[in-house]
Amino acid sequence: MVPLSSYLILSAVLFTIGVLGVLVRRNILIMFMSIELMLNAVNLALVAFSREFGAVDAQVFVFLVMTVAAAEAAVGLAIIICLFRNRKSVNVDDLNLMKW
């Protein structure tokens, strides 16, 4: 049996890597993958708590989060492709769509 603390440490490390990826990198694809990494870290923590306490509620919530993440991946990648086709760049600093 793997203890709960091991799962939580791994989840915290993955979430920290995701946060650093969003804050440090300026490439929108890397930021997008970092957000997905954060979602997976939270899913890992939820499944670990669900297994530890014997509740199925968290696992159902994980399926909901995975469904939202899949929809976000499809829509997000479509938006990134459209931005790249129009701007020829995926750098966040080059995307100033809200400026007049």
Image (cartoon, rainbow, N blue to C red):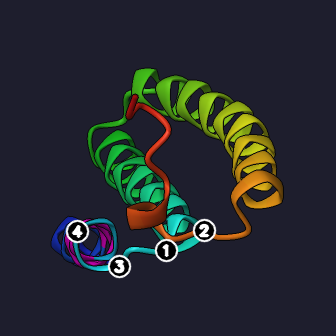
User: Which residue is identified by label 4?
Assistant: 23
Q: What label sits on residue 25 in the rendered view?
A: 3
Say whether marks 4 and 1 touch (CB < 8 Å): no
Q: State the separation of the CA atoms marked 4 and 1.
A: 11 Å
Q: The N terminus appears in which quarter of the rendering?
A: bottom left
Q: Kindly give the residue lying farthest to the front in the view shown.
A: 100
Give the residue displayed 65% in from the left and 70% down from the top. Answer: 89
Magenta-colored stretch includes residue 17: yes
User: Which residue is identified by label 2?
Assistant: 90
Q: Position of residue 9 (x, y in %)?
A: 19, 76
Q: Secondary structure at mark 3?
A: loop
Q: Amino acid at mark 4?
A: Leu
Say whether marks 1 and 2 touch (CB < 8 Å): yes
Give the residue displayed 64% in from the left and 36% down from the top. Answer: 72
Q: Secondary structure at mark 2?
A: loop
Q: State the separation of the CA atoms marked 1 and 2.
A: 6 Å
Q: The C terminus appears in which quarter of the rendering?
A: top left
